[in-house]
Image (cartoon, rainbow, N blue to C red):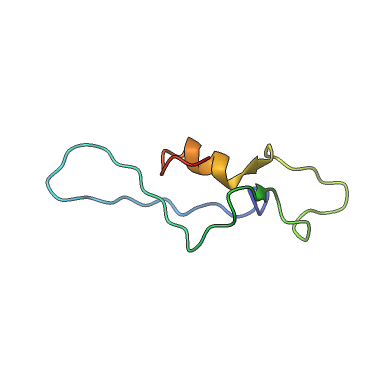
């Protein structure tokens, strides 16, 4: 979202032990305040370019991603 789709996450596969269940993992190196709005960085957007994504808060993201329930 912050790059407005210019940079995409690397696809990867992880095998966890002998489990045949699928799993979802995500990593982040730090989190903003829960009320922080996540939008494309102003320096990324070219003049007249609009966001490809609906604005959301970090709390909304964490809840939607199934992480620790917050807020």
Q: x%, y% of residue 2? A: 65, 53
Residue farthest along the left direction in this orientation: 18
At 27% from the left and 38% from the top, the residue drawn is 22
Residue farthest along the bottom direction in this orientation: 29
Q: Is residue 71 above or below residue 12?
A: above
Residue 13 located left or right of residue 3: left
Q: Is residue 59 above or below residue 47?
A: above
Q: x%, y% of residue 52? A: 70, 40
Q: x%, y% of residue 18? A: 12, 46
Residue 19 versus residue 66: which sits nearer the camera? 66
Residue 2 located left or right of residue 30: right
At 64% from the left and 40% from the top, the residue drawn is 56
At 15% from the left and 50% from the top, the residue drawn is 17
Q: x%, y% of residue 66? A: 41, 38
Which picture quadrant has residue 53?
Answer: top right
Residue 66 located left or right of residue 34: left
Residue farthest along the right direction in this orientation: 48
At 21% from the left and 36% from the top, the residue drawn is 21
Residue 28 versus residue 60: which sits nearer the camera? 60
């Amino acid at each position: 979202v912050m790059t407005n789709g210019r940079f995409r996450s690397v696809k990867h596969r992880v095998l966890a032990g002998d489990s045949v269940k699928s799993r979802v993992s995500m990593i982040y190196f730090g989190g903003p305040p829960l009320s922080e709005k996540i939008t494309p960085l102003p320096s990324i957007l070219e003049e007249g370019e609009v966001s490809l994504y609906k604005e959301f808060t970090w709390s909304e993201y964490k809840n939607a991603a199934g992480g620790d329930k917050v807020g």
